Amino acid sequence: MKSVIRKWGSNAALLLPVTSIEEAGYRVGQRVEVNVSRGRIVIHPLEKLEYDLETLVGSITDANSHGEVSFGLPMAPLGPVPAKKKPRVRRAGLRQ
């Protein structure tokens, strides 16, 4: 994507497509922190995005959903593996 930095009052502005903002995990109107590191402009969110389950589920359509996905055969249940007992060794001729 190419863009142009333009003057906006006494500041500079860079227009970014909303699709690019959303693809990067940001939203329009979100507060961000802008830093310069090694000659690059780096943008970090100031607030954690919170999602509404009803809105997310409501946005599911036939076009963006998929069928079942196989991850292979079931594995053994998770949990501790029982340790094997060590066989007792008896020595002949010794009594206690």
Image: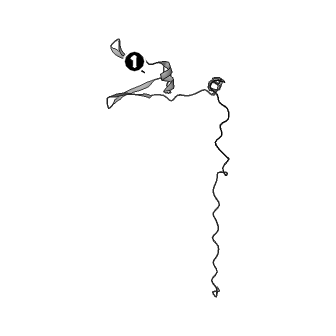
Instruction: Identify the residue at horizontal 44%, vertical 19% (top origin).
Output: 16
Residue 80's x, y, as percent?
63, 56
Q: Quadrant of residue 46?
A: top left
Sort mark 1 into few (<14), some (14-19) or many (20+) by Cα contacts within 10 Å: few
Instruction: Identify the residue at horizontal 64%, vertical 75% (top origin).
Output: 88
Instruction: Identify the residue at horizontal 62%, vertical 83% (top origin).
Output: 91
Q: Quadrant of residue 66?
A: top right
**What's the image's color scheme?**
one colour
Q: Secondary structure at mark 1?
A: loop
Position of residue 94 relative to residue 9, above or below, is below
* Quadrant in which the N terminus appears: top left
Does 6 sit left or right of 66 as displayed? left
Residue 48's x, y, as percent?
50, 30
Residue that protrudes farthest toward the bottom in the picture: 93
Task: Out of 38 and 1, give the one closest to the viewer.
Answer: 1
Residue that protrudes farthest toward the top in the picture: 9
* Quadrant in which the C terminus appears: bottom right
Residue 24's x, y, as percent?
48, 27
Residue 6's x, y, as percent?
36, 14
Q: Amino acid at mark 1?
A: Ser
Instruction: Identify the residue at horizontal 64%, vertical 65% (top origin).
Output: 84
Does 69 sit left or right of 34 as displayed? right
How many numbered circles does the render carry?
Answer: 1
Q: Quadrant of residue 41?
A: top left
Q: Which residue is mark 1?
A: 3
Task: Out of 64 and 50, give the one closest to the viewer.
Answer: 64
